[in-house]
Amino acid sequence: AQTVTQSQPEMSVQEAETVTLSCTYDTSENNYYLFWYKQPPSRQMILVIRQEAYKQQNATENRFSVNFQKAAKSFSLKISDSQLGDTAMYFCAFMKHVSNTGNQFYFGTGTSLTVIP
Amino acid sequence: KAGVTQTPRYLIKTRGQQVTLSCSPISGHRSVSWYQQTPGQGLQFLFEYFSETQRNKGNFPGRFSGRQFSNSRSEMNVSTLELGDSALYLCASSLWTSGNTDTQYFGPGTRLTVL
């Protein structure tokens, strides 16, 4: 079974600073995908960034980037130049692709990030 | 395109009652998944439907059931409600084409409170 662990239940960062959220996962699969989702206080979950396991290059989306360490099964999210709107719960997710039975998603328990003005 | 919509947004029920939640996926998306979100447990996968068939199922009792219609809209039903069923229920849809990476898009959720 796949497990996703987010060891930081809560974090805070000063506005304009950089923060890194940790995520580790456990799997025996070789082909999979990893995601970071953001859930602001309004509760709408939105995709922040995703990474294909077969790609060595770390994904980047504007101020958001990941540090993907496949051998260590680590997938951390770095937020640069933090903004007040980044305050949210962040979920790390693992997806295993199974060709005939669809994709199976596993989520971590989340990290609550507060950006302090 | 319109996003994933869920109705109702809020629901209050009493123990023993049953409830039906509805989810309309993004147009063209054929896969619909349901999750239960609670503060201590995070997101727990309930089940996934694709082409009107339940394709994957999480570890929840039989009181939780669902279905998907030909237009990909999905409903989730919880019978004999318990206090512990109080949670935010999230629906997510995805395009799902075989062999490709997939991204789930979430709805705003239905907040269920069981008294």
Image (tube, rainbow, N blue to C red):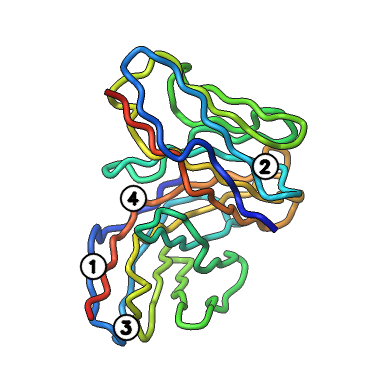
Do marks 4 and 3 share a subunit? yes
Quarter of image, res B55: top right
Alpha-carbon span between mark 2 and mark 1: 34 Å
Alpha-carbon span between mark 1 and mark 3: 12 Å
Q: Residues within 10 Å of mark 3 (few under 14, many from 20)?
A: some
Q: Quadrant of the C terminus of chain B?
A: top left
Q: Which residue is at 57% across, 79% downward?
A: A57
Q: Which amino acid does label 2 sit on?
A: Ser
In the image, residue B10 sits, relative to residue A71, either above or below, namely above
Q: Earlier in the sequence, mark 4 or mark 1?
A: 1
Residue at disc 2, secondary structure: strand
**In this view of the protein, which residue sits in the foreground, A58 or A39?**
A39
* Residue A54 position within the rendered picture, expressed as x and y whole percent measured from the top left: 62, 67
Chain for numbered disc 3 = A
Q: Is residue A43 left or right of residue A96?
A: left
Q: Which amino acid does label 3 sit on?
A: Thr
Q: What residue type is labelled 4?
A: Thr
- The residue at which mark 1 appears reads as A11
Q: Which residue is at 48% across, 66% downward?
A: A70
Chain for numbered disc 2 = B
Chain for numbered disc 4 = A
Q: Which of marks 4 and 3 is nearer the N terminus?
A: 3
Q: What residue type is labelled 1?
A: Met
Alpha-carbon span between mark 4 and mark 1: 14 Å
- The residue at which mark 2 appears reads as B31
Q: Which of marks 1 and 3 is nearer the N terminus?
A: 1
Do marks 2 and 3 share a subunit? no
* Residue A56 position within the rendered picture, expressed as x and y whole percent measured from the top left: 57, 75
* Residue B7 position within the rendered picture, expressed as x and y whole percent measured from the top left: 53, 37
Between disc 4 and disc 2, the foreground one is: 2
- The residue at which mark 4 appears reads as A109
